[in-house]
Structure formats: structure tokens, C-alpha cells
């Protein structure tokens, strides 16, 4: 079986769900063909079994010919063994096909998520993307899986039809017309079933969301109460879902009964015709048994065909969601002809606000209103929703530089930065700077005590989104991470908002020393940090109105003083 | 996941299943009886066909054939009608059972000890809520009824085969050894294999979710390759798990096929031999062969659905496991005398043998405001949680009015102490629902509005399109972080505890909103005892007393002025703050 995951999932054709499915299938055509080949042999073995049994009864049992009976028994055994072997091979190929499609979609989703970066959350909800990993991959996998059986079904149907046609044109026609006819007869029932199923699935989705919502807010519920209210609400929705399920069951059970009746009628008709031929002596008793066998067997291809149709519909829905994601493009477009890279140590400037960051120094930015700080930080790092040409590095607009270069040279770390799960040491040293850099960064971020408290130090596994750490701990680790990377220009947004004053004082004292020779911008209103930087720029309504040291501005600019000495809240 | 929730063992699983069956005797029995009758009706065909073959062999008329065919059709109609009702009843039963299961699960999740909820990542519980409930739904809706039908059909088909003649049992027995051996080998390994498989998909989803939610950070720090590698690693693990279960099936499935094949061939041979001996008729041989062949399908379904049932059972075990988390509260029924909160020689550890609090004593006066300061990791938050009754202390006790906090029923505790953190959650529902959850029974719109007013949130609440009836939360109207925090504060006003523990309650909010929020907070604090874990010194300054927590003990305790005069670590910090 092939080796998974693929090193590269490739570039998907996401113009339409059908094209996407074709593209997926094209990427795994060898295993699909393999699965189909085994599927065909496997189902054909089942198809010819009635013929073998019929002959065995005629020429062996009925004729009381021991040797022939033995020979036919041997043939049955051989066909059965081939069926067992091809059956398991078909299954192995089917699983491979399922997995290839599912894993490939996961890989595509992850890679495109990374490609979109900050754009993702602005264009699509998290749930939409997560649903791909949760449900869509199995829908896509299943359609590949069932393809092997479906092709077996088609071939074996033709095979049986040919066998019957050779015996009797009437019987052959009954099969050729009857089986597809049965499928059509079941058709009208499918649409009310689908309607009810859709209603049921809708309720199930809602129910699942309610449960997730309850679990997500469990801390709140356990903290201040309201469990009963939410349990009651869940029960109400659960009961509505149950009633929808019962309503599906009413139609579904009719369909199940029809699945007994229609094939049964078919068997009765075939056997009736066969028995009359047998009475006339046109066919032997063994052939009559074989006819019964064929009629019973034909229900398998019939069911497989129905299953294939259903799975194809589901896969198209899933493919549609994948296509919607893949069709998104990041807001920052790569320049067609990138400008020459500015030299290391070039000045970062923003024409819109008039902010100029002296290279190699640490600049603090205080904004009034303070919401502007995050917006400015985004713009300085080419992370804003609408990229603009006003931010320049050494006179070159950031938008004119390759996106990867900008990301490497200018790094923005804001309050919403996520700490990812995995080994802590790896999560801190994302650029491969080495252990010494990590140590130094941890010391600057005053995060030594966090490490001391961990049983395995840097080998400790960080849980999902760093939840095992407190807000303050997470913030210091995030700071240490970005310091370890040692970027040319570092933009920090309120890097110490969640740490205590003791620690903030230590960080403020060490930060400038750590960043010596590098350019650092800190968006903050904390006096401890402001006092530790080279210069402070004060922005009002998005424009720099004063620059100088913290002490100068405190003394000379009343508006600045009002912003940084916050009203005290009495506790 | 820092704490993994338990998984129920097979004993409790069985007890639960039996209990569940006992709750619905009528539906269960009618489903079974109907399935049995439907299967019996279905068994007429081979017998009739056997007779037909024999009469054809011996020479018969078209009339006779027509009569038998008519009989065949009659049984078919009966089988159809019975099948319809059998399926209906069992699906109705399935829906009923499923509803009970999921409601029990959510009920159990809602009863989890607060300490466990605080400590466990939401990932595990969310996976159980989504994936396991779905898996179980599939098992109960589809696998269980199919399996039951298959068992009934198999047993009856075998009985019918035997009814042709006792000799038919002999070839059937030949199939048993490979069947039993294969099945035992497979089932011993399958459950762990499938659990690993399902865990690997949870991991893929967790990594994907994390990547999606942190996409901005991924871009800013150039973590793209790292995230891609993480997903590929998860896929690799999932593939390894899939390969293992595939290997199991590769051994198991062919052994099944052989155990189906051998009886069919043997029946034909034995029947043929007995026919030449004249001890059985041609019709018997035909009917026997057909029955034995008919046996394959139900037996195969019984066997194939077993692993599906195992997976359902594994999901059920994970769902029931939530009920097995031991409660860390022991309600004694003692009633607090007064509102004084006190800690007495409290020690606590999250990990065995690593105490983070080393004997803390603190008596909080009624109406007093205490600021807790100290370096990160000194144990402030832990002490705060203990003072809020979330964790029981390892030794010593935390009391309100002389009664241990963990001795109080949760409902009562909330009336005494509440913990306020920076985390907030807006539930899907109306704004009113979001607040009413904390309100005492009987509280109406007036109380809700008063609470919103107290936290200065009435203005924006009234400006919402439908006021209190506006649907908020995921999928509804999005509230800003500051508004969500105000909702959290308004809930506190409604819950009305006399003591509040604030753990960096406003620290991650941007400064401008924080100022507004601090006003809301001040309103909530009015008239209550407050223990504030402060990270900004200016909030410590006005407290009645300041507790400096260092290395798991209270190193200094006194008013701001006393501590400054004492010239300890608090004084040093205060100077550095003011020196700027």
C-alpha cells in the first residue's frame, strides 16, 4: 500500500466541487484502478457462484455422479478462495483510497490556512474550516472507498445479465430492465426521506453546537450557576431531534420494507418464469436454483449503486466547502516585480502617522485613542486587512517587497498571539536559533520561574493553545518566543499587560539591553516600559504629535500625562 | 490535555446497557418479536424452492408451480409488512435511547467538579461532546438494530437449516473453528486499535483547530512550516493507527470468508453423498445448500458490525467516563455562621509532592479589601482559587463562617464566594438568557436590567436591535470583549456573593476599555468583601490590606502604609514604581 501522508498534497483544482473530486481521484488513480480491478473480480466471483452451485446440483447430485460432484465442489472452493483473496485486497485498496483522499484534504486545508494567515479569520469562520477536518474528510474518503465496489457492481450486473440472456432472452430482459427499474421505483421515496433527513441533520447540528457551547462555557456555568437552565434547553433540543429521528424512521422503515419487497418480487418473478421453463423441460432443476441465486445476488449491486449515489451527493457537499476555503486568497498580494531589499538596519517609517523608528533603538508608541495602537502595529507589520503603501522600510513600501521577506524582517507580536501545543523548547525556538538564545530570551522575559515549576523544563508538552499556563505566564512565554527569533524589527503590542508589577519592572529593565543594535517598537501605556525606552512617540488621532523621552513628555505634554497616568480604581 | 477525563470500564458499561434496556421493556420486546417473525417469514423461500426443484425433477404441472409461487409471494408480503414495523419500532427505540444517552452525558458534564473543569483542557470534553456522541448515534441508530436483526436472522436460518435434517449441522460445525479463532484474535486487538485510530483523528482536529484559530500568529512569526509539519505528523500517526487496524482486518476477513465457504461446499458434498445413498431427497439437498448459503449474510453482518459496536462501546465508555470523575466536594450540611472567609495553614499541590502553597494563614474581614501582590508563579492565583472554594486544600482548610468551602453545596457556595477571571464566555441565546443563568429563581427583567445598569452596560444593551431579546454568542450578534466582560460582571451582580476573588480580571483588555470596565467592576465590588490578585500596584495602594505572596507563603501582610514603612519587598517595588 502506498506511503502516506504525501510529502506534497499538490495544487487542487477548486473551480467547482466536481472538478475538485476529479482532481482528488486523478491523484490516486492507480489505487483507484487497483481497487476497481479487485472489486470486479471479487463481485464476479459472487456472481458466478449460483451457476457453479446449479451445475453441481444438476451434474453432480441429481446425476448421482460422485466424481463430477467432487470436481464442482473443488471449483466452488477455488472460486470462494479467489473471492476471499480479492475481497481483502479490494478492502485494502478501498482503505488506502479513503485515507489518501481524507489526508490529502487535511493537508490542503492546513497548508491553505497557513497561506491565508491573518486573512483567514476575516473571511471565514473557524467552525467552517474545522468542519472540514471533522466531517468533510470522511465524506470525501467514502466516495473514493465505494468506487471499487461500485465498479464491481456494474461489471457483475452485466455478467449476470449475459449469463441469463444466454439461457433465455425473456429472463435476461427481465433482469436488464427489472434491476434498473427497481432503482427507479425506490427513487420517489428517497426525496421525502432526504427532506426529513435534512431536517434531522439540521437539528443534530444545532444540538451539537448547543453541547459545544455548554462545554465551552462550562467554567462560567460551574462558577455562577445556570446548569439546570442549560440542561433543560439541551433536553428540549434533544427531544426535538429525537422526534425528527422518529419522523425519519417512518419513511426509512418503509424504504427498508420496500428493499425486502421489490427484490422479493423480482426473485418471485424470476423463479416463476424459471420454474415454468423447468416444467417444460427447457431448463434443468439446477439452473432453476442458479436463477434464484442470481436474482438474490443482484440485490448487492443494486444496493451498492444506491450507496454510491448517496455518497457522491455527500462528497459534493463536502467538496464545495473545501473549494470555498481554497478559493480564498490573502489580502496581501505578492508584488509582481519585487523591489530590491533595503539594507539591514534601514529605517521603518509610516507616512500616514508620521512615525519614524530610528534603527537600532527602542521606540515606544502611545496612542490616544488607544485602539489605534493595535491598528498601527498591524500596518507596520503588513498585517492589516487593507494593505497600504504608506509604511516603508528604508524608503521602500512594504507592499513592494516579497511577503516572506517582510515577515522575516518585521515581526509583530500582539496580545492575541497564540502559544501552540507541543514541546515547549520547540515552540519557543521557532527559528532554530539554538538553546543559548532561548535561555537568554527566557531570562529577558523573566520567565525562568515558569520553567522551574515545570517537571520537564523545556521538554514539557504545552497543551492546546497554551491553556495550561496562566494569562501572565503565556504572555511572557510569547515574548520569549519572539525574542528568541531576534528579528531585525520587532513590534510588540502591550507585551506586559498581564504580568505583575514586579515582573514588569524586570522585563522593562532587560528588554532594551536584549535588543541592543536591533529596532524595537513597543505599543504600550505602561510607565515602567515607557521609562525604559530610548524614545516615545505620542500619537493623537493617528498622527504623531510629540516625541521625546518619557520624562520629557510627562513634563511637557499634558495630554500624554493624562493617558499614561490612568485613573486609579480603588480596590 | 493537562488532565484527561476518565473512561468507563466494561463492567459499568454493561450495567449501564442493562439499565437502559430495562427502562424500555415494551419497545424492546415488540422490536424483537417483530424481527423474529419477519425473519421466519423470510425463511420460507428456500423450503418452497427446494420443494419446487424436487417436484420439477419428479415431473409436475404448471398449476402446481403457480400455487407454490403464489405461496412464495404471500410470504414475501407478510415479511415486508413485518419488516416495516420491526424497523420502525427499533428505530424509535434507538432514537429514544440515544436521546437519553446524550442528555445523561451533558447532565454529567454539567455536574463535573469545578476544579476538574478549570484544570482540564476543553479539548477532551469537546471531542467527547462531538465525535463520541456522533459515533454513538451511528451505533445506536444503525449498528445496534442491524446487528440485532442479523443475530435473529442467523439463529433462525440455522434452525431452518437443521429442520431440513440434522445432518446439515455437521458442515456448519466445520465453519465454527476458523470463525471463533479469527474472531477471538481480532476482538482482543480491535478495540485498542480503533481507540488509537479515533484519538489520532481527534489530534488532527486539535492541531487543525489550533492552526486555524492562531492563523494570525502563524503568519506573523513565520510558523507556517512548523504547523504544516505538525499536521503531517498527526496524519502520519493516524496512518500508522489505520495501518494497524487494516492489518487486523487483513488477517481476520479472509479467515471469515473461509469459515463461510467450507460449510457451503461441505453441505453440497455431504448432501450429494446422502442423496446417492437415498437417505435424503433432491429437494432437501437444495434447501440445505440454500439455507447454509443464506446463513452467510447474517453471520457476516453479525461479525462485521461487532467492531462497529466495539467503537460505539468505546465512545460510550468515554461518555460515561465523565460521570466517574469523583466529586471533590463533600457536602456536610453544616451552615456557615457569618460571612468571614479564612484560610488556616493551607497547603496545596497540583502535582503530587510539589506543593505550591506552603502553609498559608489569612483571615479576611467582612467588607475588607485585600490586594494580593507578588511575582508570577508565587501562588497568588492558586491561593485565589482555594479562597473561592474551587480546589480543596491538601491540608488545612478554607472556611466561610466556620464551615469549609468544599463542604458547601455548589449552589450555596456561589452565594458566598465567586471567582472572577479574565476568561468570559457568551452563550448562544438571548442577552437575557446569558444573564438569567446566574439569577436566583424568580428574578425577572427588572433584576436583569438593574444588573446591566450596575455595570454600566444598559446603554449598549438597550441599543441592541431587540434589546434583551437579541441573540448573542457564536452565530448571533457578536459582543466586543469589553461587552462580554460586562456581561460576566452583570452575572456576578445577579449571583450576589458577599465575597469576590478577582484574578487579573481585566488584565487582557486593552487599556481604554479597561478604564471603562474598571468603573463597571467598581460598581460590582461595592459592598462586598474583595480579594484582588493585582498585577498593577495602583490597585494595591487603596486596599485595606496588602498581602505579598512569595514562594507559596504570605511574606508580608498589612496596610499599604505599614508595608512601605516596614521597608520590605513591597516597599522596594513601590519605590521603583514611583521613581519613574
Image: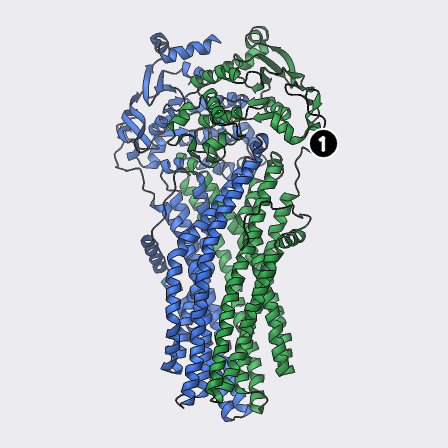
Q: Position of residue B436 (x, y in %)?
A: 45, 36
Q: Compared to A352, does B16 lie above or below?
A: below
Using the image as rendered, state which of residue A517 and residue A399 is in the foreground. Answer: A517
Task: Tell me the residue at 36%/18% (across/down).
Answer: B548
The chain in blue = B
Q: Colour of chain A?
A: green
Residue B351 visible to an observer of this rendering: yes
Residue B52 in view: no
Q: How many marks?
A: 1
Q: Is residue A440 above or below residue B65?
A: above
Instruction: Tell me: residue A113, above or below residue B20.
Output: above
Circle 1 SS class: loop
User: Would residue A15 appear left or right of B475 to someone viewing this image?
Assistant: right
Q: Tell me the subunit letter for badge 1.
A: A
Disc 1: which residue: A335
Left or right: residue B258 versus residue A488 is left
Q: Residue furthest right?
A: A337
Q: Position of residue A94 (x, y in %)?
A: 54, 59
Amino acid at each position: 500500500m502506498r506511503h502516506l501522508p504525501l510529502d506534497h498534497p499538490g495544487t487542487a483544482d477548486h473551480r467547482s466541487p466536481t472538478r475538485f473530486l476529479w482532481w482528488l481521484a486523478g491523484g490516486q488513480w492507480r489505487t483507484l484502478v487497483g481497487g476497481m480491478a479487485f472489486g470486479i473480480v471479487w463481485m464476479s466471483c459472487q456472481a458466478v457462484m449460483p451457476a457453479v452451485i446449479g451445475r453441481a446440483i444438476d451434474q453432480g447430485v441429481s446425476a448421482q455422479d460422485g466424481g463430477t460432484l467432487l470436481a464442482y465442489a473443488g471449483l466452488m472452493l477455488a472460486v470462494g478462495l479467489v473471492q476471499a483473496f480479492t475481497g481483502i485486497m479490494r478492502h485494502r485498496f478501498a482503505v488506502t483510497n479513503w485515507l489518501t483522499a481524507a489526508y490529502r484534504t487535511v493537508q490542503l486545508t492546513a497548508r491553505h490556512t497557513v497561506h491565508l494567515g491573518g486573512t483567514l479569520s476575516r473571511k471565514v469562520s473557524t467552525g467552517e474550516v474545522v468542519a472540514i477536518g471533522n466531517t468533510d474528510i470522511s465524506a470525501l474518503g467514502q466516495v473514493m472507498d465505494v468506487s471499487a465496489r461500485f465498479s464491481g457492481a456494474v461489471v457483475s450486473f452485466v455478467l449476470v445479465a449475459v449469463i441469463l440472456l444466454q439461457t433465455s432472452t425473456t429472463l435476461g430482459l427481465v433482469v436488464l430492465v427489472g434491476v434498473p427499474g427497481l432503482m427507479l421505483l425506490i427513487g420517489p421515496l428517497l426525496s421525502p426521506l432526504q427532506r426529513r433527513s435534512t431536517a434531522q441533520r439540521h437539528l443534530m447540528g444545532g444540538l451539537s453546537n448547543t453541547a459545544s457551547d455548554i462545554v465551552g462555557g462550562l467554567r462560567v456555568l460551574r462558577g455562577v450557576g445556570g446548569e439546570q437552565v442549560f440542561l433543560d434547553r439541551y433536553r428540549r433540543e434533544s427531544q426535538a431531534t429525537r422526534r425528527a429521528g422518529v419522523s425519519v424512521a417512518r419513511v426509512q422503515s418503509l424504504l427498508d420494507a420496500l428493499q425486502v419487497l421489490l427484490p422479493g418480487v423480482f426473485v418471485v418473478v424470476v423463479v416463476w418464469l424459471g420454474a415454468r421453463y423447468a416444467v417444460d423441460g427447457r431448463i434443468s432443476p439446477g439452473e432453476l436454483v442458479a436463477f434464484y441465486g442470481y436474482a438474490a445476488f443482484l440485490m448487492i449491486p443494486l444496493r451498492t449503486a444506491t450507496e454510491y449515489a448517496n455518497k457522491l451527493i455527500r462528497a459534493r457537499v463536502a467538496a464545495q466547502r473545501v473549494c470555498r476555503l481554497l478559493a480564498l486568497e490573502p489580502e496581501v498580494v505578492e508584488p509582481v516585480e519585487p523591489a530590491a531589499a533595503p539594507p539591514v538596519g534601514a529605517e521603518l517609517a509610516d507616512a500616514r502617522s508620521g512615525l519614524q523608528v530610528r534603527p537600532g533603538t527602542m521606540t515606544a508608541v502611545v496612542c490616544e485613542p488607544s485602539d489605534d495602537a493595535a491598528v498601527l502595529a498591524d500596518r507596520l507589520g503588513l498585517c492589516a486587512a487593507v494593505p497600504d503603501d504608506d509604511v516603508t522600510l528604508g524608503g521602500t513600501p512594504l507592499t513592494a517587497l516579497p511577503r516572506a521577506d517582510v515577515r522575516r524582517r518585521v515581526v509583530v507580536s500582539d496580545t492575541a498571539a497564540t502559544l501552540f501545543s507541543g514541546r515547549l523548547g520547540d515552540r519557543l525556538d521557532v527559528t532554530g536559533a539554538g538553546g543559548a538564545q532561548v535561555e537568554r530570551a527566557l531570562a529577558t522575559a523573566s520567565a525562568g520561574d515558569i520553567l522551574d515549576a515545570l517537571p520537564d523544563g523545556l521538554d514539557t508538552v504545552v497543551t492546546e493553545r497554551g491553556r495550561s499556563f496562566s494569562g501572565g505566564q503565556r504572555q511572557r512565554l510569547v515574548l520569549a518566543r519572539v525574542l528568541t527569533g531576534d528579528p531585525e524589527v520587532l513590534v510588540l503590542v502591550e507585551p506586559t499587560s498581564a504580568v505583575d508589577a514586579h515582573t514588569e519592572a524586570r522585563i522593562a529593565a532587560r528588554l532594551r539591553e536584549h535588543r541592543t543594535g536591533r529596532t524595537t517598537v513597543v505599543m504600550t501605556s505602561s510607565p515602567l516600559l515607557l521609562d525604559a525606552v530610548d524614545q516615545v512617540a505620542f500619537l493623537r488621532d493617528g498622527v504623531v504629535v510629540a516625541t521625546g523621552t518619557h520624562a520629557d513628555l510627562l513634563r511637557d505634554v499634558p495630554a500624554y500625562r493624562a493617558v499614561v497616568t490612568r485613573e486609579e480604581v480603588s480596590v | 490535555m493537562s488532565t484527561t477525563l476518565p473512561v468507563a470500564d466494561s463492567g459499568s458499561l454493561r450495567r449501564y446497557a442493562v439499565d437502559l434496556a430495562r427502562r424500555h421493556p415494551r419497545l424492546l420486546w415488540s422490536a424483537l418479536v417483530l424481527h423474529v417473525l419477519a425473519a421466519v417469514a423470510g425463511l420460507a423461500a428456500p423450503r418452497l424452492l427446494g420443494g419446487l426443484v424436487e417436484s420439477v425433477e419428479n415431473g409436475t404441472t404448471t398449476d402446481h408451480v403457480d400455487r407454490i409461487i403464489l405461496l412464495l409471494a404471500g410470504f414475501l408480503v407478510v415479511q415486508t409488512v413485518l419488516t416495516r414495523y420491526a424497523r420502525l419500532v427499533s428505530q424509535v427505540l434507538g432514537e429514544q435511547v440515544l436521546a437519553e444517552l446524550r442528555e445523561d452525558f451533558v447532565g454529567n458534564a454539567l455536574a463535573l467538579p469545578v476544579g476538574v473543569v478549570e484544570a482540564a483542557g476543553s479539548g477532551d470534553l469537546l471531542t467527547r461532546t462531538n465525535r463520541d456522541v456522533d459515533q454513538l448515534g451511528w451505533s445506536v441508530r444503525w449498528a445496534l438494530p442491524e446487528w440485532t436483526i442479523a443475530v435473529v436472522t442467523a439463529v433462525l436460518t440455522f434452525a431452518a437449516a437443521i429442520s431440513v435434517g440434522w445432518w446439515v449441522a455437521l458442515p456448519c460445525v466445520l465453519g465454527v473453528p476458523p470463525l471463533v479463532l479469527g474472531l477471538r484474535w481480532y476482538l482482543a486487538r480491535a478495540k485498542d486499535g480503533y481507540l488509537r485510530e479515533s484519538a489520532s483523528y481527534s489530534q488532527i482536529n486539535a492541531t487543525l483547530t489550533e492552526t486555524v484559530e492562531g492563523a494570525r500568529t502563524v503568519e506573523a512569526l513565520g510558523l507556517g512550516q512548523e504547523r504544516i509539519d505538525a499536521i503531517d505528523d498527526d496524519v502520519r500517526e493516524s496512518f500508522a493507527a489505520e495501518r494497524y487496524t487494516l492489518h487486523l482486518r487483513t488477517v481476520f476477513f479472509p479467515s471469515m470468508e473461509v469459515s463461510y465457504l467450507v460449510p457451503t461446499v461441505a453441505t453440497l458434498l455431504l448432501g450429494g453423498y446422502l442423496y446417492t445413498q437415498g437417505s435424503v431427497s433432491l429437494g432437501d439437498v437444495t434447501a440445505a445448500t440454500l439455507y447454509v448459503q443464506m446463513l452467510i449474510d447474517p453471520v457476516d453482518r453479525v461479525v462485521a458490525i461487532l467492531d462497529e459496536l466495539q467503537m460505539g462501546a468505546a465512545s460510550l465508555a468515554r461518555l460515561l467516563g465523565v460521570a466517574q470523575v469523583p466529586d471533590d466536594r463533600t457536602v456536610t450540611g453544616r451552615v456557615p455562621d457569618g460571612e468571614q472567609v479564612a484560610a488556616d495553614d493551607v497547603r496545596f499541590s497540583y502535582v503530587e509532592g510539589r506543593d505550591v502553597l506552603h502553609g498559608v494563614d489569612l483571615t479576611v474581614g467582612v467588607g475588607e479589601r485585600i490586594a494580593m501582590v507578588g511575582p508570577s508563579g508565587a501562588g497568588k492565583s492558586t491561593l485565589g482559587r482555594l479562597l473561592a472554594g474551587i480546589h480543596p486544600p491538601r491540608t488545612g482548610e478554607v472556611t466561610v463562617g466556620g464551615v469549609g468551602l468544599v463542604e458547601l453545596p455548589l449552589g450555596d457556595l456561589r452565594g458566598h464566594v465567586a471567582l472572577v477571571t479574565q476568561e468570559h464566555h457568551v452563550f448562544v441565546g438571548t442577552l437575557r438568557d446569558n444573564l438569567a443563568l446566574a439569577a436566583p429563581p424568580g428574578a425577572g427583567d427588572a433584576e436583569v436590567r438593574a444588573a446591566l445598569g450596575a455595570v454600566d452596560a444598559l446603554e449598549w444593551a438597550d441599543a441592541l436591535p431587540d434589546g434583551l431579546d437579541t441573540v448573542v454568542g457564536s452565530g448571533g450578534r457578536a459582543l466586543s470583549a469589553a461587552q462580554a466582560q460586562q456581561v460576566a460582571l452583570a452575572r456576578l451582580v445577579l449571583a450576589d456573593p458577599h465575597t469576590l476573588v478577582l484574578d487579573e480580571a481585566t488584565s487582557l483588555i486593552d487599556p481604554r476599555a479597561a478604564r471603562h470596565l474598571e468603573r463597571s467592576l467598581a460598581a460590582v465590588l461595592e459592598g462586598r468583601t474583595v480579594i484582588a490578585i493585582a498585577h498593577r500596584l495602583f490597585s494595591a495602594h487603596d486596599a485595606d490590606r496588602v498581602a505579598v505572596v512569595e514562594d507559596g507563603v504570605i511574606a508580608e501582610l498589612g496596610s499599604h502604609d505599614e508595608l512601605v514603612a516596614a521597608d520590605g519587598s513591597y516597599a522596594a517595588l513601590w519605590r521603583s514604581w514611583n521613581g519613574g
